[in-house]
Structures are given as structure tokens and as C-alpha cells.
Image (cartoon, coloured by chain):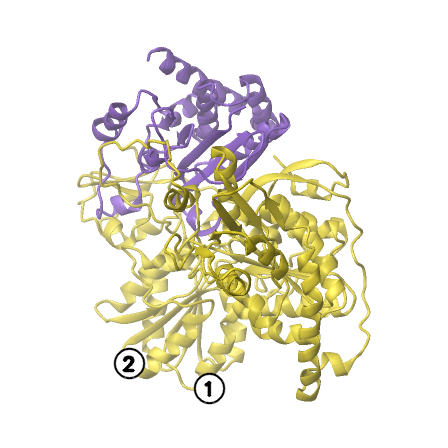
Amino acid sequence: MYQMKELLIDDAGRKELLLGNEAIVRGALEAGIGHGSTYPGTPSSEIGNTFEEIAKDYGMYFEYSANEKVAMETAAAAAVSGVRSMAWMKHVGVNVASDALMTLMYAGTRAGMVIVAAGDPSMHSSQNEQDNRFYSLLGNIPMLEPTTPHEAKEMTKYAFDLSEKLELPVLVRTTTRVNHARGVVTFDDLEEPDDQGHFEKDPARFVSVPQNARKNHPRLLERMEKAEPISEESQFTKVIEEDDPELHVISSGAGFNYIQEAKEEYDLPISILKLGMTNPLPIERVKDYIEEAERVLVVEELEPFLEEKVKALAKEVNPDLDIYGKESGHFSRLFEYNPDRIKDALADLIGFEDQAEPLSPEEYELPSRPPSLCPGCPHRGTYYSVKQALGDQEAVFSSDIGCYTLGVQDPLNTADFLLCMGSSVGAAGGFSKNTDQQVFAFLGDSTFFHSGLAPLVSGVYNDHDFVYVIMDNRTTAMTGHQPHPGTGKTGMGEPAPMLSIEELAEGAGVEFVETVDPYDIEKTTEVFERAIEHDGISVVVPKHPCALIEQGEVSWEPYQVNQEECRQCHLCTNKFGCIALVREGEKVIIDETQCVGCGQCAQICPFDAIEQGVEE
Amino acid sequence: MKRVDLEIVGVGGQGILTSSQVLGAAALEKDLDVYMSEVHGMAQRGGVVVTTVKIGEEVYSPLIGKGDADVILGFEPIETYRAIEQASKKTWIVTNTQPMVPFTVSVGNEEYPSVDDKILPSLEASTDRLLGLDAEKLAKEAGAAITQNIVMLGALTATDVLPLSKDEMIQAVENQVPEKFVDLNLKAFDKGFDRTKELIESK
């Protein structure tokens, strides 16, 4: 297989087929990164996974921070100490880090600092599809928008230089089809990593008390003015020319790929202005481009970020210009683009006729296939036990971000409310104060360290009353099994103190703290029964390693349904719902290719019909 | 050289990422341009996986338009069906016929249409280029059910749509899979290749 260590090969001109996220890492290595920090989040996670593999060999420092805000702050400290740094996160991670980021922009940095914010149009793995380009306006952050893995590498590398020139952090804003696209990337020379920095004190700049902030704010605006001519000259702007075009196009980000492909493939009479640096916008370049145009189409995913600016500039230089995009209805503000959405817009604007004739066989109602908890997942035992403990009692299930969110599906239905990382806990407190319903908060171990502590403390202080379930599967499972403060291992692969969730809860003043193995359904149910009875916050820690990790270490014999004993009550499929339990008519069988032999279902069968090693 | 667009569909855990990466590596080895899109994160947990691989002299985007795929490589029959809009009459539809039943069906909420009575006949009725094979069975014959992704790569190679020869594909499999599993995977590749050649000849 392709090895991540190949990213450390110092061989300019070498070509590799890289994931966008790996290309970003390579760009940082070519810039001599000294510090990297993150909290994992799709679609940015593989940046961290890659640094985890290579940071030591390269000679830099890398950490999984407890959350994105900490990642931002550690990277900021590195950069003001003269060490090139990068912090990366998914788009909503920037919300967490934004408190630090907005003020960091005032003081600025010294060595280059790059922030990668990975957006997720269409919400492949996210709770929203917010357009993070607006952070560049909110914080006055210089911004680059790569379109391909290769450009992601080039822009990341360049962003360090730009950051140093402006003494400001630079935002590299990506989307899923850049981070999780794989393309040919050409290497440049590797740079030596920035080693130990030294912090030169300058409190007038770096201590943001009001009198200093009042000086830093105008300085930030001056630096952004300095960025304007740089944007005008940007190597990442290009025009794909056309003699006497029927349509002008302005585009940035992943959407550019599809319009460029349409032009090249169908030889369309359009010209394209592709923008790379979109804050500050190269205003003169855009004005020049639209000045003589009659019609311009703006191709950008999500919000009309460029479109609004093009409209404002057209008022100055070409008030008769017809501008198409979101407002004209040619594009939507929803979801990612693809070749078809581009073709539809072109059909209306230049009469493009798509020759493709998609097959349309007889339509059948196809069953949906949403993602689901894996066979052997300990969360399933936890949820089943909670339901058992509740019996007929109604409860509100306040859920969180992680694999356990999949409890929202049938037949578990253990998610009623979800906003963001850590929201389960604060919301549970709110439900407990404002309803007379029994309340549960469900979140995982990594999410607990990320943002489960502050609402715990707040809840103890304010006498909230709910069962706080910290589902400890010993890893950050959903994003690909990264270590966290409870795992005893750092991102550099070094041993670390293994923080105890139970001791932290006790330290916060929680009186009821119990740990249980969720593979033991009876014991887990009994613990939940007592936790429900307890007044105030009761913390339950169902603790069992993620099945995907455990299956790499142990191997159990799959279970089978003894058809002579099975009474076809379907409790296992209707209430427990492991995906290895398959209905064939009235019969239930176990798919032996999926069953991992965890034995949870065997415990819930009222007729003891699920056994190991039975011939059917 | 005309660009070749492949849509590879199936279910998380079927080894789709590995097969698309083998394909990409083979193309890069031949100095062709490759652009792919992959699925990572939440969707991998037993959900639908759609991966695209586009190979040519210069490839501009990672996604495929409706009717534009040259091949749909389906690892699961209803997932092949779900992706059918990407196909037109010219498209080879190479599909595993062995279902993976989603939990929405096993809990009794939804129904899985019969592969033999509904899915395959209605595909047959709309195209001459359907190639259905039981990849799981062939993989087991080769020695391990887990090699069905390589069976499917063998099947893909047999369509002759790729700008890559059988030898070049075999070389990529050898390079990309762990050394101790090379023989097993090459056997799986041949199983898929031979079965698909038979299917094409019988057309």
C-alpha cells in the first residue's frame, strides 16, 4: 500500500496520488511546519492521521488538542514564538475556535500560521453546511480557496509565506471534494522543520486589553490593505480565455472543477475567471473581467459570497451587466455542486444540450441504507439497557456528536435533541429544569474531554437533574480512532497520563459515579435503574473498547440462532437491532460474515435461542 | 485518449476504497492523470459508499454526471440499481449479485426487492451491457470472502474499458496489497476476470 511516510521523500518533481488532506500535509512540510494541532473532524481528519504517522520522523511537534479552541491557541503561541504552525479542523470546529481566532487576528502572528477549515457541503458527515468563507470577513482573515488536491498543497505552502508577509494567520478554506478527493500531486523540495522558538515579549501587542486592542484593530485593517495588492497579483487567479465568449464565469473552490470540465469537454464558448485568494478579493481583476462583459455567471457552492461582491463591483464599472447565480435561480444555496447542476445552468444560459441519456429502468422502492452502529458496538448494549431500565417511563434523550448519534435510528431511538459537540449536557440540564421528564445526556469519551466538562460543572452548581452517560469506547471512533486525553497516548505516539473520566466527575462534585461494561446487559440495566432513582446529576460510564479496535485484537466465534429454540418473537431485531441479525420471513438468522461474537444479543433472547457453535 | 469515468458503489466495509486506490495507482504508474472522490467518516459505518475514479490525459473534476459513467462497478445489487442514473446504453454495469441486507430491512421496516426476479431482469431489459457475477462466491473459491473487492477489479479489467492492460492491473494489485496476501488476491483477480470474460462471450 501507499505509505504515509512517502510524504517525507525529498524529491522535487515526484508525483503521488494523494488525498487532498495528505496534499495539505505535504504543503506544510514543504513550508517547514514546526507545530501542528487539531481536534479530529470529517472532512479534515486525515490531516491529523497523517501527521500522527510522520511528525516524529520529520522532527516537528504535533498534538491532538482536547478541542479546536485549544488547537488554535497552541498554534497561535507557536507562531508568535517564531515557529511555523498550522491548526486544522472541520468547518464547525472553527465555531469552537472562533473566540480565540477573532482576537488573534488583532495581535497577529510572527512566524507563518495557517488555519485549515474544512467545509462539508451536502453534509456528508456534519450537522450543518455553514459557509466558512464568512469567517474571513468576520475576522479580517486572508483566505485561499483551493480547487484540487494539488492546489491544496500549493496553497498551504504559500499560505505560510503570505502569513509571514502580513503577520496574520491565513485561512485555507476547503470542502469535502477537495479534502476527500484524490488527485495527482507534484512534490517540491522539503523544508527543514522550524525548531525551538523563543517568545519575544511585546505586551502592547499581545495582551489584548482595551487600550491595546484599540491600537491593534486599526493595525489589522492596515495589514488587510497590504494584502490587497498581493491578492491582485495572486498566482492562484487564472483566466481561461475564450474569443468573444457567450458567457463570462467567475468561480472559486470545488465548483470551479465542474465548470472547467464542462468547458473543456464540450468546447463551450465561455470564459472563466478562477479566483484563488478570495479575501481580500482581487477587486481590480474582477472589475477588468466584468467591465466589457454582457453576462456573467457566478459558480460557487453554498452562499452567494462572491456573487454579492460581483454585484457591487458591477454597479461601478458595468451597471448593465446581467449577473446570474443564486438570486437568478440558476444555482441553489443548498448542497455541493456536481457536473449536472452546472449543465442545468448552462442549458438555460447558453442553450447547452446534454447528449447523455441516462438509463431509466423500472423503478422499485429501494430500501434505505443509512449508516448504523457496527456489529459488536458497545453503544448498542448501553442504549438497550437504558430502555430496559426505563421500562414504560418516558425520557428525553439529549444526544451528541459521535458514533452514538446513530442511536437516533430504529429500533433504538435514543436521540431526541442534538446541536453540536458537548450540547447533550447543557441541553440535558435545560430539559431537567424546564420539564418534568426524565432526562439523559449521551456523549462519548472524546467528546467529554472536548466539551463535556464545563456543562458538568455548571450542572452540579445549578442542581441539574439528569443521567449523564459517558460512553467510553477508549477512542475517537467516528473520525477514525484518534487518541484523546483518556487513552494514555499522545498524537506523537508518546505515553501520556490516562485521565480518568470518573475522577474528573467526582472532582466536580458528582455523588453518583459508576462504571460498567455495557456488554453485560443485566448489570448495565441495574446501574441505570439506580442512576434514574438518584437525585441530581448521576454519571454512568459504560466502558468497553470500540468493536472495530477490539476485533483487531481478539477473535470470537460468531453466534447463531438455534431455530429449534427460537419462538420468532423478534425481540432481538425489533428492540436490539444489531445489523448481523437478519430477518428471513418470520425466521431470524445471524449473518456470520457480520457477527463478531460479542454475545450481547444472546443475553437479551428470552428463550436462550442465540448460541455459539450451533449447527443450524 | 478518451477519459474513462468509473463509479464504484457499495456498502461501507466492502473494501471499495482499497480497490479504487489500486486502480488509481495503476493509472498513475502509467503516467495518466487521475481524479477520484472518496467517502470517509460517518457514511462508512455500514452506509452507502460511492467512489468515483476518472482516468485520462487531463481530468478536471472528481464527480460524474448523469449518464456519463463508462462503468458502474457495483459491489451490491441494490446499490448498483441506486446508481443507475449515472449509466447510459454505452455503460458497462458490472455488479456483484450477492445482496447485503440493510438493517432497515432486517428490522422489518422496509423490503429488499428480489435480485433474481426484479433487480437483474429490469436492468437486463434496459441495457445490453449488464454483467452480474457472484463476487462473494468467487472470492471464497479464491480462498477468502474478503477478497471480493479484488474479484470486482478483475471483472472490471475484463471489460477492456480501462486504458490499462491486465498485466498492468495485476502489477498494481501486487504493489498495493500486503505481501503475504498477494497470491490470494491474484487468484481472486483471475476469478473475477475469467468469469466476466465468460459473461461477455456469452452475450
Q: What element carries label 2?
A: loop
Q: What element carries label 1?
A: helix
| Label 2: how many Cα within 10 Å (few below 14, some 14–19, many 20+) | few
- Residue for badge 2: A435
Q: In the figure, the purple chain has which letter?
A: B
Q: Mark 1 points at which residue?
A: A461
Mark 2 — on which chain does it sit?
A: A
Q: Position of residue A68 (x, y in %)?
A: 58, 66
Q: Position of residue A82 (x, y in %)?
A: 79, 66
Q: Position of residue B170 (x, y in %)?
A: 56, 21
Q: In this view, does A7 lie to the left or right of B62?
A: right
Question: Which residue is rendered at x = 49% and y = 72% of the image?
Answer: A452
Q: Which residue lies furthest to the bottom in this view?
A: A211
Chain identifier, colour yellow: A
Q: Which of marks 2 and 1 is nearer the N terminus?
A: 2
Disc 2/disc 1 C-alpha distance (Å): 19 Å
Q: In the picture, residue B176 is in which quadrant?
A: top right
Circle 1 Cα neighbour tier, 10 Å, few/some/many (<14 / 14–19 / ≥20):
few
**Residue sitting at 36 percent across and 15 percent down?**
B199
Chain letter belonging to callout 1: A
**Amino acid type of the residue that numbered disc 1 sits on in the rendered structure:** Tyr
Measured as percent of width and height from the top left, residue A208 is found at 68, 82
Tell me which corner region of the image, top left, top right, bottom left or bottom right, holds residue A128. bottom left
Q: In which quarter of the image is the C terminus of chain A?
A: top left
Q: Can residue A480 be seen in this view?
A: no
